[in-house]
Amino acid sequence: MRSVSQRIAAVLVMLSGAVIGGCSARHINWDNPGAPPGTGFQTKSFEFEGQRRYYTVFIPYNYDGKTKFPVIMFLHGVLEGGNDGRKCVTVGLGPEVNNRAATFPFVVVFPQSDTDWQGDYHTRLAMATLDLVLRDYPGTDPDRVFLTGLSNGGDGTWTVGAAHPERFAGLAPMCSAVNYDDAPRLTRVPIWCFHNTMDPFRSCGAAREMCDRINRLGGSARFTEYFEMGHDCWTRAYSEGEVFDWMLSLRRGAPLPDAAKPVAGRASDASRAP
């Protein structure tokens, strides 16, 4: 029979494997094979408050500048911080966009901070990057802009979304920490929050409570809990793809959706077993 210390060590090993494996960078086809010129992943830069900042934008293969496309802004985790404009694409939404590149129906904005997404500076950086893409690509729809992110970027999804709720048609924070004081500012934007039950870094219960508070205030916050161990809930959430169907059903200023209503007839916000 194993000792208590051996059992604790085994659990820590499993947690480390889940966390490290989940946060591993994935391959991105930066050369955009098969993409028409000017589409696919494009890394660019701009001057922001006295500094040159790099970012990546994904442009759908059928983008023509006339048809209006919805937009997703993705906020990376702290390990993908920097200023190369590319590392921020390698974990989370970027690999799933890469897998679906030929048919993915969103323009995707990948801003990059040096660290996390807390504080006014980082909110300004994210919004400046978004505004630049909306300006440079006339085929983007400002009434269908969505914000999502993982870990520290999930924290930032709540923070940036609360600072500018009027700009977004929906928020999708993944494995995020929350600030209950933000709840009253988030009652007019649809939210779908994802979390693993046994997340060692972010409280699943706190995220669930945040959604409950928003709903009690008259908002629309769905909560999906995966009965899994580890920090990475984003791989499953993005790969299953229901979150994209949900986004495509939304528009800024439209009546709030029922937070408990399934998307496209599938399971909604009940806790899900593996």
Image (cartoon, grey):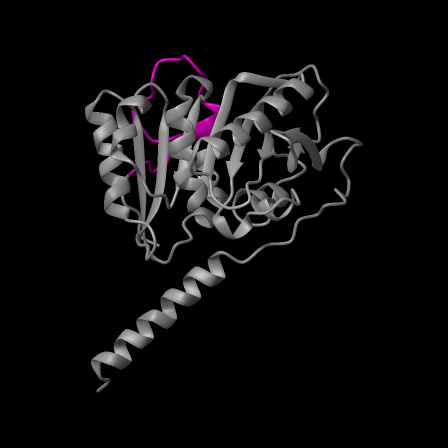
Look at the picture and state if 1 lies above or below 123: below
- Residue 260 horizontal/vertical position (percent): 27, 30
* Quadrant of the drawing holding the N terminus: bottom left
Look at the picture and state if 72 lies above or below 6: above
Q: Is residue 137 visible?
A: no
Residue 164 part of the magenta-drawn span: no
93, 260: nearer the viewer: 93
185, 220: nearer the viewer: 185
176, 106: nearer the viewer: 176
Left-right relation of 24 to 48: left
Q: Which residues are magenta?
A: 244-269
Left-right relation of 25 to 253: right
Residue, far left? 216
Look at the picture and state if 46 lies above or below 228: above
Residue found 63% across the figure and 44% down from its top: 83
Residue, far right? 37
- Residue 22 horizontal/vertical position (percent): 47, 57
Look at the picture and state if 148 lies above or below 132: below
- Residue 165 horizontal/vertical position (percent): 40, 21
* Quadrant of the drawing holding the C terminus: bottom left
Residue 249 part of the magenta-drawn span: yes
Q: Is residue 110 visible?
A: yes
273, 130: nearer the viewer: 130
